[in-house]
Amino acid sequence: MVFWRKKKNQKEQEQDEQDDKILHHPGEPEIEPPVEYDADISPELEQQLKEKPSDIIDDIKETPLPKSQKDSQEDSKRVSDKKDEGGWLSRLNLGLSKSSGKLEKGLASFLTGKKLDAEALEKLEEILIAADLGPKTAMMLAKEIGDSRFGKETSEEEIKQTLAERIEELLGDVAIPMEIKTPEEGPRVVLVCGVNGVGKTTTIGKLAHQLHYKMGKKVMLAAGDTFRAAAIEQLQIWADRVGCKLISKDLGSDAAALAYEAYEQAKADNVDILLIDTAGRLQNKSNLMDELGKIRRVLQKHGEALPHATLLVLDATTGQNAHSQVETFQETVDVTGLIVTKLDGSAKGGVVVSLADKFKMPIHAIGVGEQIDDLQPFRAKAFANSLVGLTES
Amino acid sequence: MFQSLSDRLGGIFDGLRGKGALREEDVNTAMREIRVALLEADVALPVVKDFIETVKEKAIGQDVIKGVNPAQQVVKIVHDEMVELLGADETELRALSAPAPAAILMVGLQGAGKTTSSAKIGRFLQEKHRKKVLMASLDVQRPAAQEQLRQLGEQTEVTTLPIIDGQTPEKIALRAMETGRKEGYDIVILDTAGRLAIDEPLMNEVKAVSKATNPVETLLVADAMTGQDAVNVAKAFDEKIGITGIMLTRVDGDARGGAAMSMRSITGKPIKLIGVGEKWSEIEAFYPDRIAGRILGMGDVVSLVEKAVETVDQEEAAQMAEKFKKGKFDFNDMLAQYKQMSKMGGMGSLMKMLPGLGKFADQIEKANVDDTIIKKQEAMILSMTMEERAKPALLNASRKRRIAEGSGSTVQELNKLIKQHAQMEKMMKRIKKMGMGGMMKQMKGLMGGKDAAMLDELEGMSEEEAMQALQEQQGGGSGLGPNPFAGGGMPTGGGFPGLGGGIGSGMGGLPGLPTRGGTKKNRKKKK
């Protein structure tokens, strides 16, 4: 201890020694172990050693209420406090109320006379455009309304009804719930992808909660976003909330390898559904898209059918670029369904209508908030009605 | 956007060529197309309407310029008008001139890219403006958000405020400002949680933070992909919190970015910065004319030059030049050259900025030829000992084997590298013999007028062939990657070292394109 301060003041040094003698008896046993114990265990091992809620659940062999239930109850209470009713429909209505409000206002004002004239139709088209339906779909819908009602006496209510019905018709074919049946040979694998910041990780958290808690499935998550800082930690928090197992690797490791191993692990653990998160990527970055394609290819080494579902998460705030997203992601990983997030904002989400018209791709669910049960099934009628500002009948 | 716009307009104006002035009906037809194009580009409807009116007024009655396609002429009017609309007098961050610690408050919707942008700005201010920056995350909503900023801080070497669990955003903000004052930070970046503009409680929360910290700059971070909602978002944030500027993210995506126009025109607040990639350096000032120019396919030379000046270490360059004068070129020099290149954002990003090379850059990006080869070669050089790097002649079979193993490559690949180096060295010697002037003359002779034809040729070729051909053309068939210092880029010449004389002349001096080796057969001259 004193070796390195040899050139210190002589007097001081003696004093120190004196102090030392007083403090420590020569025969005194060493209190601390001579070598500091360094566990030096790998992160993987540490993760294995850490008991997780899912382990306990495995032991019980039934699906208990997850730890987070209390939280989510509080959450829903908070939501209910904030908004009058906690039911999903009213929440959706509430979430969409801003958009429908805009549409409604527009619709209320466009019928100046009693008859539907060219000017009114143009306004109708503009309103649809402002709801992000895109110029083409808006034109098409306005033209259809015009064809059936032009020059006739009509009321706002009627126009709304017709519009809602037509939108519902367009969306009806794509409002398909996500298939969750577990195949015989192993867990059902769901790959979740999308551009940056659309809410992939949050969606996975909500999805896991629904599958686990509401449908009694055994869920496992794989932290395939090995690029963004703290993405793994974020998913870990969700996994803890839901009470399911998370497979992860270090930042910067190969996402495809992780997906491959996650499947093996999920199979060994008798998991029903494996949800794989991926890093956000812009669809025009071909190297990143190739990487996504690789995840899929590597997964397919476990079986041709893998992944059983590939979900593309879309942000409702996104404009017409959503078309490019759907197109490119479909080319790369054969997207099987969409989840539209952030519909609780002022964004209209109208792009969904033009997407449905163009790609006929199933829309499974919508995200309407940041809380754990703010993921709702996509329902064409409710969505269409909300979009045009019709109250649920 | 404009590419397809001018195609569209082409049809309308076909009958017009040489007819004198742009007629109202033609312009009206064109405006309908422009309206759809702008709407498809996600420009908000009210903005489109105003914009169309202005452009229409300007376009009607204008003389058709001889030799110019009327469609192009209208596109030019559209372009100029857009530049004017997007432009602003105040584009610099206010925090640069404010008394320390100046707070920058980052606000926006969820997933707009606030945290990443915070880190980018932090690094940008620290590197480019030599400011002492502190970052703090006030995001207590999203799981691991604070952790994310902490990790980003580590990666970008920008200090972050230590996380204390359970603090409210306002408390964290105050703590950040306090730390900023006490520890002498110039700028404190406050990263907030994503929030919806219609979420009253959360908007009030950020308002409280703003009141408590009195930020000199409140940046609205918005995604370039945002649709019609952009106007609502920008308006709501501006009205409730009072923004001073906009940062547009994901400009590197293929979204047309109409949101920029919507938000600029609705709030009147300038777009100050844009995020153009996932790397930390990929943040740029917003220049409306450059962006418009880039969209129009005119290239962005100015950005490239700025980037070069910024990344090239002048001293290092001078040292290297000194070495080159003596005709020396060893593996250390090669390594330095590669490093410099990757600092500038890799091949693809360099090429994108050069006029007329956009397509080529895409191809390169697709083939991913640039960074992998360079990385591999870098690894090989790094696996050599210092002596080997300085004296390539030392490399015998067993050393080669060791290096190949150490770098995860093969001896063949290493041989290619050595060959390439030898060729570069030979070139250096030639330069020494000829002197700089002679070299430059030769380069110019090689390039002048040939660029266009060369590029056409390149487009039709596969990636590998293209690279090969490029090198043959440039290096006089010696398969040499054009040397960065060969093309008049000597620091003494007032140019930008590392860029060579290439800026003005197309492909000129992209530093050290690695050769792909290849056999004698496909190395034959194309003539």
Image (cartoon, rainbow, N blue to C red):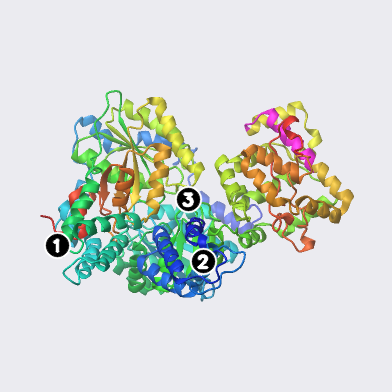
Three-letter amino acid code of the residue under disc 3:
Leu
Q: Quadrant of the C terminus of chain B?
A: top right
Three-letter amino acid code of the residue under disc 1:
Glu
Q: Which numbered disc, 1 or 3, marks the residue that appears first in the sequence?
A: 3
Residue A339: percent from the left, percent from the top? 30, 46
SS label for mark 3: helix
Crowd class of label 2 (few under 14; some 14 to 19; many from 20; radius 10 Å): many
The residue that mark 3 highlights is A23
Q: Which residue is rendered at x = 42% and y = 39% of the image?
A: A331
Q: Which residues are magenta?
A: B408-424
The residue that mark 2 highlights is B74
Q: CA distance from mark 2 to mark 1?
A: 43 Å
The residue that mark 1 highlights is A157
Q: Chain for mark 3?
A: A
Are both tags, 2 and 1, on one chain? no
Question: In the picture provided, is B263 more to the left or to the right than A80?
Answer: right
Q: Residue furthest top?
A: A185
SS label for mark 2: helix
Q: Which residue is rendered at x = 83% and y = 54% of the image?
A: B441
Q: Quadrant of residue B223?
A: bottom left
Question: In the picture provided, is B407 more to the left or to the right than A200?
Answer: right
Question: In the picture provided, is B442 more to the left or to the right than A102?
Answer: right
User: Is residue A95 in view from this perspective?
Assistant: no
Residue B242: percent from the left, percent from the top? 38, 73
Residue B37: percent from the left, percent from the top? 42, 59
Magenta segment includes B419: yes
Q: Nearer the viewer, residue A53 or A81?
A: A81
Q: Which residue is rendered at x = 24% and y = 47% of the image?
A: A171
